[in-house]
Image (spheres, grey):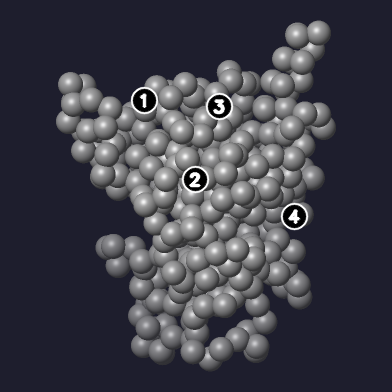
Amino acid sequence: MMDTYQPTLFELIDDFPQAVPISRWDSFRFADLFAGIGGMRLGFERVGGQCVFSSEWDVQAAKTYAANFGETPAGDITKINASSIPDFDILLAGFPCQPFSIIGDKAGFHHETQGTLFFDIERILAEKRPAAFLLENVRNLIAHDGGNTFKTIKKHLEALGYHVYATVLNALDFGVPQKRERIMICGFLNNVDFKFPPPVPSHKRRSLSDILEDESELDEKLWVREAIKNSRVERMKIEIGRPYITHENVSGMVTPHPFSCALRAGASANYILINNERRPSARELLRLQGFPDTFKIVVPYSSIRKQTGNSVAVPVITAVASEMLKALNTYERRSLIHDR
């Protein structure tokens, strides 16, 4: 076990393809919508970005964001006029997935997206016309409503003139011990040559042991009752070496893994247990998402549990951001050469 955890995003950033050092993309501006506690912001700051606008409606998440970035995000995005937002180059949004009402081709543009939070992304993109965007959502967005939701999103983004790329990436492949599969949707106004990042080599990934704190220093309230522990142990189908994390699925089956399942905002307090004995600490939850140990905790444990469940795996965002910058820089460099 390591005494001090060094966050994956900082350790691995040198391994990600870097942007060509020319043009405005050496220093660019971005907007952080549905900002949560700033996971996407951290990733884009690591590749040279400057946040010029953020928005988050949840009061507790905004409190954590303010403590760590020195600014309180604007509130409800549905009430913000797009023209009032400062100009920016890249839009970021880990937007909530609300059910889309698909009425049909004759229903028109607004009927397909009005009433969903994706509409607010759409109207801001239409007004500000940034060069690129990154949207993040749950893997199931692809299958929602028989695939119609994703098709609608892609259609409307392309109607705005963007070239759209999408794939599912797993946080386990980018250095954190959490199986978290999320869809990444990237868009570019120019027809850039973009590819999603490859997985990090196995020897560069953090293990569960690497992110656990010294248990002697943890709050005793993290430990579960003996009855809960015994119930988990009795239902565990296999045994593996410590440390491990278990979670109970809908059928009641308990399986240990040397990594966490995806953190969930609405899960019960005992959703995941370390060695069937205790809940992860607030710092361990942040580490499972790749946040640095310098990240300040200013809200109760229950709020951090919700906030990390709603957040993103920072190393994944960093890797995608690096590839986006590489593609944007390469395109601009070629354009400059062509224009000479």
Report the label total.
4
Point out the frontmost of discs 1 and 4: 1
Horizontally, residue 206 falls left or right of residue 36, namely right
Look at 64% across and 54% down and name the residue there.
Answer: 42
- Marks 4 and 3 sit apart, C-alpha to C-alpha, by 26 Å
Mark yes or no: residue 225 visible: yes
Q: Quadrant of residue 91?
A: top right
Mark with earlier residue (2, 1): 2
Report which residue position mark 2 lands on: 84
Badge number at residue 10: 4
Q: Residues within 10 Å of mark 1 (few under 14, many from 20)?
A: few
Point out the frontmost of discs 2 and 1: 2
Q: Position of residue 338 (x, y in %)?
A: 75, 8
Q: Quadrant of residue 2?
A: bottom right
- Marks 2 and 3 sit apart, C-alpha to C-alpha, by 23 Å
Q: Quick check: marks 1 and 4 in contact, CB under 8 Å?
A: no
Q: Residues within 10 Å of mark 3 (few under 14, many from 20)?
A: many
Badge number at residue 155: 1
Q: Secondary structure at mark 3?
A: strand
Q: Secondary structure at mark 4?
A: helix
Look at 64% across and 63% down and name the residue there.
Answer: 69
